[in-house]
């Protein structure tokens, strides 16, 4: 059985008041399938329709048109039944009770999901170990850092052993290390328990570190749907460097690198990672120039998307 | 001094602009007034026309005046001040070259005056329709300054009370207690003449009486001009108290750290 | 059923987790209630009786009022902020769980301060209400009916947010109004106001009827109390359910 299947899923809202009421199509003709055990990243800029899609798949929102099934159930008509078999983690909303410990929240969730008491206790301990949260779950949630809290949220989300995990922008607000750890946990859950992962994000790094498949949505429609490996090969081949030199280096030429001069001492470099690695560029720069500062970033999502629009390979 | 007056003016203008909020508060006041009018009319009728020296006529004007004077101040101000103090937000105010409590009082006064005028206008109309004009023109003439003094005393006392937050960690729920003291000992819920004689005398000697009883007594037709003097004295004392508490508290913050 | 109880228990645990604040707030509430008792005692000391009401009866009213508000607003404290919760997105969190969203939201939070009322009410009844086992039973019955009406009324008002948007201000106003009117002997009010209190703002069913039942039990009145409770419960559940359907169709949202 497929984990998720949608056919021409569409959602129209009526926005504005009175005379400026107009129809807004938040999401149009979304069609894709997700196999069990897959890790899918559902990527798109803000306002692209990610949240609307995930709300329909979890049964909170009814579509205007189209169909979808999750684990064979129709989300908006079988919400409660589906809720027992999926887990949802919405990045900006907490399901942990703030003044209590995570364990206390899990205790209640066990009742809500009708888990056997002994079973629940065992799962709690297992999850705590799996998510490196053993020393966290007995602390009041309000005393945890955001990164620590997200790991506990994850525990709460999967306590009842869901078959599909919906994560909506879960890494927002986390620092780099916390993000990495969180992604590792999600992959671990998928690999050790076979949980299907459906992750929405506008962070391109989530594609690289979590997903094996990526669907890109923009302006309400899907513009790309492929394995990450293939995307990496065809699209994600640049890295951006911003370099500040101690003194003006003059004209800079490196094969495979596009150089833009932003000022006498600040240069932007676009590295074609097919031709050479960032490391090689850095070595070249550091060997031959006095560098004051360097930063290395992934290309922004907008650039990836415009590449997708520009030329599908 | 001019900084304080400017602050009063500024807050008053702001309060006048927030018409929705003002309307809700005045509607609330009108509702309470309608209920108490019903209550007290029925009560006096059942008692042969007067209770504790008040007729229905004077009682209703009492209630309108007492409620109006008290309701002009925000009910949870003590909570808000306490929060500003315990969260440390007040430290930024300490950086200004003016008295923290002075500016705060001026700001609250501006808003309160707007609310006072709005409430009393509406309350006056309601009670006039119910029982007729105020029992004494002289009383009303004295009532006008008395209501302003009442508001001043209330604001100063609340600031002094809230200043406890400089020392206690969570004094926020105490606004509830303060409110009940004003309601009962201040004569807002019932005229102080309702209290047993000993208690009534004690209540009249407390500052709460200046916040509701004094203006209400005047509006209800009892021309007792010395009440204004009592109010003025309390205002001075409460202002000094509030000032002292805040100064001590600020010094403590500077020494101990926020 | 047990899920609701478990949620309520957890909500209580959360309120209880700040021990010092817990007792402080209960204490303040109790002091507040004592102040009101003093008011009424002083009032009737001067007034004697008023349209069949005296100190005894009004204290009975107050005992009912505090018990009802302690239960409806203390234990099920989200009943009065349902509109606010909906506007803030808490409904989505409730919908993610395999439970009834309304039940979950209502049991999700306990208000410590109002629990003070719940402690005070029965104590006042025992102290001043002339408690016999029979009267105690009627007291409990009356309080339950009153609570259901109060919660039902507030939930119905809050559910309007599902249709019309906003942040639940209408529920806030309704809450203030019903509580004020329910605090005074109903016979004080004139004909038109009294009608109002049996319909638009059902304060009469929250405290008026229950008080009269304890005072002098009459079957027709008891039936009326149950009918009112059933009506408001149904109104609440229906309004919420229909509203939820509108909410799920996205009528409130304008962007993804």
Image (cartoon, rainbow, N blue to C red):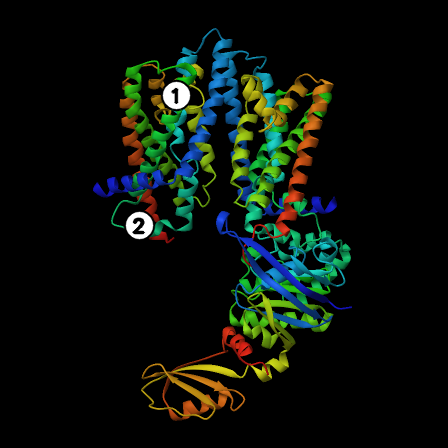
Task: Find residue A155 and report its horizontal and vertical position in percent.
Answer: 66, 62
**Residue in view at x 49 percent, y 51 percent:** A20
Q: Earlier in the sequence, mark 2 or mark 1?
A: 2
- Give the labeled residue for mark 1: B202
Nearest the camera: C244 or B257? C244
Which quarter of the figure has residue B79? top left
- Give the labeled residue for mark 2: B94
**Residue in view at x 45 percent, y 41 percent:** B171
Q: Is residue C103 left or right of residue B105?
A: right
Using the image, determine if residue A94 lies above or below residue A181: above
Task: Find residue B127 and report its horizontal and vertical position in percent.
Answer: 41, 19
Q: Are marks 2 and 1 on the same chain?
A: yes
Q: Is residue B138 left or right of residue B62?
A: left
Task: Find residue B141 and report its horizontal and vertical position in percent.
Answer: 28, 20
Binning the other alpha carbons within 10 Å of mark 2 as few (below 14), some (14 to 19) or many (20 upward) gives some
Which quarter of the figure has residue A217? bottom right
**Residue in view at x 53 percent, y 75 percent:** A305
Q: Which quadrant holds the C terminus of chain A? A: bottom right
Nearest the camera: A177 or B72? B72
Q: Is residue C226 left or right of residue A11?
A: right
């Amino acid at each position: 059985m497929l984990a998720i299947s949608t056919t021409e899923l569409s959602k129209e809202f009526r926005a504005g008041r009175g005379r400026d009421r107009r129809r807004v199509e938040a999401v149009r003709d979304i069609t894709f399938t997700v196999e069990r055990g897959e890790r899918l990243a559902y990527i798109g800029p803000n306002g692209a329709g990610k949240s609307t899609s995930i709300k329909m798949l979890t049964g909170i929102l009814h579509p205007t048109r189209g169909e979808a099934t999750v684990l064979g159930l129709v989300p908006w008509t079988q919400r409660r039944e589906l809720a027992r078999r999926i887990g949802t983690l919405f990045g900006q909303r907490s399901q942990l009770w703030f003044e209590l410990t995570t364990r206390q929240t899990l205790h209640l969730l066990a009742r809500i999901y009708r888990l056997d008491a002994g079973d629940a206790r065992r799962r709690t301990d297992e999850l705590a170990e799996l998510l490196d949260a053993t020393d966290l779950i007995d602390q009041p949630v309000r005393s945890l850092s955001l990164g620590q809290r997200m790991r506990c949220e994850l525990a709460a989300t999967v306590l009842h052993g869901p078959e599909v995990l919906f994560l909506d922008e879960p890494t927002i607000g986390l620092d780099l290390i916390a993000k990495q750890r969180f992604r590792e946990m999600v992959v671990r859950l998928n690999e050790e328990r076979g949980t299907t992962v459906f992750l929405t994000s506008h962070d391109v790094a989530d594609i690289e570190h979590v997903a094996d498949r990526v669907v890109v949505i923009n302006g309400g429609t899907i513009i790309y749907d492929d394995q990450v490996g293939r995307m990496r090969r065809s699209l994600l081949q640049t890295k951006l460097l911003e370099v500040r030199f101690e003194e003006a280096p003059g004209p800079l030429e490196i094969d495979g690198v596009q150089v833009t001069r932003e000022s006498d001492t600040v240069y932007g470099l676009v590295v074609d990672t097919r031709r050479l690695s960032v490391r090689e560029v850095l070595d070249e720069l550091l060997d031959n120039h006095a560098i004051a500062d360097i930063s290395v970033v992934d290309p922004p999502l907008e650039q990836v998307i415009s590449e997708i629009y520009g030329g599908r390979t | 001094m001019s900084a304080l007056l400017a602050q009063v003016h500024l807050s008053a203008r702001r309060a006048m602009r927030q018409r929705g909020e003002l309307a809700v508060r005045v509607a609330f006041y009108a509702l309470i007034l309608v209920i108490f009018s019903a209550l007290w009319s029925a009560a006096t009728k059942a008692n042969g026309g007067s209770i504790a020296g008040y007729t229905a006529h004077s009682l209703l004007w009492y209630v309108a005046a007492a409620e109006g004077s008290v309701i002009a101040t925000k009910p949870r101000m003590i909570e808000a001040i306490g929060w500003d103090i315990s969260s440390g937000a007040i430290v930024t105010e300490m950086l200004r070259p003016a008295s923290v409590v002075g500016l705060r009082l001026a700001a609250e006064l501006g808003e309160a005056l707007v609310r006072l005028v709005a409430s009393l206008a509406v309350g006056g109309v309601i009670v006039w329709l119910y029982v007729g004009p105020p029992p004494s023109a002289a009383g009303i003439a004295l009532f006008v300054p008395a209501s302003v003094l009442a508001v001043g005393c209330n604001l100063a006392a609340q600031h002094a009370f809230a200043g406890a937050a400089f020392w206690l960690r969570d004094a926020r729920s105490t606004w509830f207690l303060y409110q009940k003291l004003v309601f009962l000992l201040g004569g807002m819920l019932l005229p102080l003449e309702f209290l047993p004689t000993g208690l009534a005398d004690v209540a009249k000697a407390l500052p709460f009486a200046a916040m509701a009883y004094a203006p209400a007594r005047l509006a209800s037709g009892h021309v007792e001009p010395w009440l204004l003097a009592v109010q003025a004295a309390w205002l001075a004392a409460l202002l000094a108290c509030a000032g002292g508490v805040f100064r001590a508290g600020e010094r403590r913050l500077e020494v101990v750290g926020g | 059923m047990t899920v609701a109880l478990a949620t309520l228990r957890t909500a209580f645990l959360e309120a209880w987790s700040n021990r010092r604040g817990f007792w402080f707030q209960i204490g303040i509430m109790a002091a507040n209630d004592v102040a009101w008792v003093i008011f009424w005692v002083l009032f009737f000391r001067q007034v004697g009786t008023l349209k069949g009401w005296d100190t005894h009866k009004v204290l009975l009213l107050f005992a009912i009022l505090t018990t009802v508000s302690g239960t409806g607003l203390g234990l099920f404290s989200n009943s009065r902020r349902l509109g606010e919760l909906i506007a803030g997105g808490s409904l989505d969190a409730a919908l993610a769980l395999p439970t009834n969203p309304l039940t979950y939201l209502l049991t999700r939070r306990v208000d410590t301060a109002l629990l003070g009322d719940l402690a005070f009410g029965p104590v006042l009844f025992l102290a001043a209400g002339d408690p016999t086992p029979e009267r105690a039973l009627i007291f409990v019955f009356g309080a339950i009916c009153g609570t259901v009406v109060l919660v039902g009324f507030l939930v119905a008002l809050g559910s309007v947010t599902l249709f019309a948007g906003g942040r639940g201000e209408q529920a806030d106003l309704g809450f203030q109004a019903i509580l004020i009117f329910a605090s005074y002997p109903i016979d004080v009010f004139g004909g038109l106001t009294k009608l109002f209190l049996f319909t638009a703002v059902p304060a009469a069913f929250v405290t008026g009827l229950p008080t009269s039942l304890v005072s002098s039990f009459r079957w027709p009145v008891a039936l009326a109390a149950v009918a009112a409770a059933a009506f408001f419960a149904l109104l609440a559940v229906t309004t919420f359910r229909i509203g939820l359907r509108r909410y799920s169709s996205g009528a409130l949202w304008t962007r993804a």
